[in-house]
Amino acid sequence: MNHDHLREDLDLDLDGIGDVGGMGGIGGSGELLAPAEKARLEEHLAGCADCRRERESLQMLHARLAASVIAPREGFTGEVMRALVPAPWEARTLVVWRWPFAMLLALGGLAAVLLGGAAAELEPGAGSFATFLALARLVESAALAGAGLLGASWQGLGSGLGEWLGASKTNLGLAGGLLLGLNLLFLRLLRPSSRKAKSR
Amino acid sequence: MAVEALDPTDEALVRAVLSGDRDRFELLVARYQTRLVNYLYRMVRNLEEAHDLTQEVFIRVYQALDRYDSQYRFSTWLFRVAQNAAIDVIRKRRIRLVPLTRRAEEGSDATVDLELPDGQPSALESLQGRELDASIRAAIDTLPWEYRELILLRHYGELAYEEIAEVKAMPLGTVKNKLFRARQMLKQQLLGHQALGN
């Protein structure tokens, strides 16, 4: 065993003793030297004045390094927490949806009470089942009216577009060009992200 | 120093934050803020900037928390982000270099020196108890970059040897050997300044 190698062990041993970060050593302990290596080192140190001096100067170096650690400014943790902006992944957590869901329930409840009250006023003396049926019919009529409007507008848009396309070949060419342009734009937008994904 | 197992572990805290318990991130901030501020202070050599950068690192990490791969240690991920952030600042600073002199008066050929911050802690910093061992800092600054980085990660980032090996993508044996050499250089440098033991 040479002298230099023992000095490396000495340095490692002192670093393990001052292992501030934790888990720096063997098997997750603070010790960086195996027990057999440590015993050999101690034995050497007992008979070598040079290495004992080396140990002292290294101890002082470790102490100086430790003493130069500074504390962050007061209230820094709070500053960091206040500076955090909502992350995109937060939208996927259930907790985030807790309040909107509660609001939706409350509004739904309020609407039910109001509509129930109105129905009871329109048909006094009607039972709760009859009130419920009246409400269901109201919702059904609203849904049918909405669907009808939507269908009519799409139909109108479709027939209008058909008329315009059939009016001249120029219109047909223009529509084809527009479609091609949109496809190219879509491909252009896709290309950089696929390159990034590959580089990752 | 005896090793204390961290409870809850970093990984458990990350899981809690990801499941919606945002306040658990505060524990991670409290756990790492001193280590990051110290590490970044020695990297960028300006305490205010080190605080700002530490805050930025935590924000970046929070934003990307869902991409954290728990098969690696949280600390190594955090310090890799910090290291990249510090290198960006240093690189930008080099680009922003300005001439060290300016014309004394319009139309005159005479020049005067510009007063630039010297990277030393201000009087205010000292007054606020942020006193730094200047001799240690000067000695660390003389180390070659690769050795300096390891000293900062070990003694100010307080990373374990295995964590440094992960951050630097270096074999564990190389980390041990380089840290030994770095401390030898540091010791020589400090002995040269008669600083060790005073």
Image (cartoon, coloured by chain):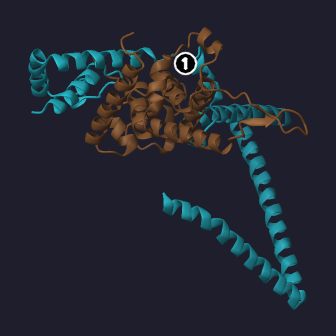
Chain colours: A cyan, B brown
Report x, y in % for residue B29: 51, 25
Say which of B110 and A180 sits in front: B110
Residue B137: where, in percent of width, then height? 48, 23
Is residue B42 at all visible to an observer of this figure?
A: yes
Three-letter amino acid code of the residue under disc 1: Pro
Q: Residue at x 63, y 36 (%)?
A: A86
Q: Is residue A24 left or right of residue A3?
A: right
**Chain letter of disc 1?**
A
Label 1 residue SS? loop
- Camera-nearest residue between B103 and A34: B103
Residue found 79% across the figure and 52% down from its top: A142
Q: Nearer the viewer, residue B29 or A113?
A: B29
Residue A90 in view, yes or no: no
User: Which residue reaches farthest bottom?
Assistant: A169
Relative to A56, say whether A191 is above or below. Answer: below
* Number of residues whose C-alpha sits closer than 10 Å to that of mark 1, classed few (under 14), some (14–19) or many (20 or more): many
Quadrant assignment, res A58 = top left
Name the residue located 39 percent from the left edge and 30 percent from the top edge. B151
In percent of width and height, residue A55 lies at 24, 18
Query: Which residue is farthest front?
Result: B109
Is residue A128 depicted above or below B37 in this figure?
Answer: below
Report the quarter where the C terminus of chain B lies.
top left
The front one of A4 and A8 is: A4
Residue B134 picture location, percent across and down: 50, 18
**Residue A4 relative to residue A149: left or right:** left
- Image quadrant occupied by the N terminus of chain B: top left
Q: Residue at x 25, y 40 (%)?
A: B173
Residue marked by disc 1: A72
Q: Is residue B38 left or right of residue B177?
A: right
